[in-house]
Image: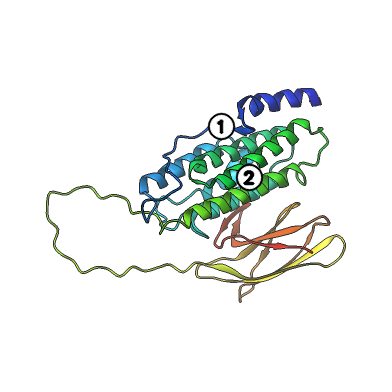
Amino acid sequence: MTKNVWKKAATVVLGASLVGGVVVEIPSALTTTQAQASTQIPYAQYQSDIRGVESAVDKATVDVQSDVTSELPDPNDEDAYAQSGSFDNYLNSLEFAVSGDTDNKEQAIENLSALVATYNVFKSRLTAGEQNQLESMASKINNEIVAADSDVDYRYDISQNLSAYVDALDSAVLNYGNNYDGVASEPKAVSQQVPAQKAPTPKTSTKKSYISKLSVKKSSKKYVKVTGSAKLYKSAKYARVHTYKGNKYTKLSSKHNFSKKVYAPKAKTVKVTVGNYSHGHFSSVTSTKTAHLK
């Protein structure tokens, strides 16, 4: 396909729907003002956000959809908007997916559309500064897609900008979640009977697994050595190491340590997630930890 045809395709899919440089196809979602009036995020808002991100990812490439379907937010996660919560884990998976599955112009168009639709789910509850940042990033990426030649290395260039966009959105959603004390419980149906008084049940908190140590360094001009360890409260057998070259997997030791040498001569950042890997599918147990190469 020629550059002019690509440019026309990008304009139809994205350019025609840009207002102020941003795709504005907004999934149906409840909205709130930035000044929060309650201590918990309403359950109805949470369910609406889940439906919103599910609708948004339908705009992505088939490969991206396949990679993140199993990571869609848990409908009963009271810590969904917190670090290592359902939205944090989902957006980390989405970040990996668009970085590894954007190989050509058509895929870049579809994936940008999905990311901006995801942003629109949360837009009204983000700060003005976060909105300006994300809309500026989306506009810049859109312009890069329209102007790019067919021989552009999408996996290293535009795909990395898409990944950075999701990372910024994840940070904004976490900032929003920090304004609240979790998600409210699902409302109970009103009963005509007066229940017997019961002693309150102590609330238990589930400990979350995490990567406790992570080190990355150049072992040569073309290879990066990644080492680390995880603190696990849930079974996990693999560490996923992500660079601009894609994902590599390595087994955890009996003490939950990992070590992997990966080919990535231009790598600037390395992201690691610990979880389980089987038949080409990875499910995360920890949140993603990022290390920067000097």
User: Where residue 106 sits: x, y (%)?
Assistant: 70, 32
Residue 7 lies in quadrant: top right
Colour scheme shown: rainbow
How far apart are the two marked residues, 2 and 1, measured between alpha carbons? Answer: 16 Å
Q: Residues within 10 Å of mark 2 (few under 14, many from 20)?
A: some
Q: Image point 60% across, 32% down: which residue?
A: 23
Residue 113 lies in quadrant: top right
User: Where residue 131 sits: x, y (%)?
Assistant: 57, 43
**Label 2's element?**
helix
Nearer-N-terminus badge (2/1): 1
**Label 1's element?**
loop
The residue that disc 1 covers is 24
User: Where residue 175 sits: x, y (%)?
Assistant: 52, 55
- Quadrant, the N terminus: top right
Residue 180, placed above or below residue 13: below
Q: Image point 60% across, 40% down: which residue?
A: 115
Is there any visible trace of residue 258 in the rendered image? Answer: no
Q: Which mark is residue 133?
A: 2
Residue 277, placed above or below residue 137: below
User: Where residue 225 sits: x, y (%)?
Assistant: 77, 67
- Say whether marks 2 and 1 touch (CB < 8 Å): no
Kind of residue at badge 2: Gln
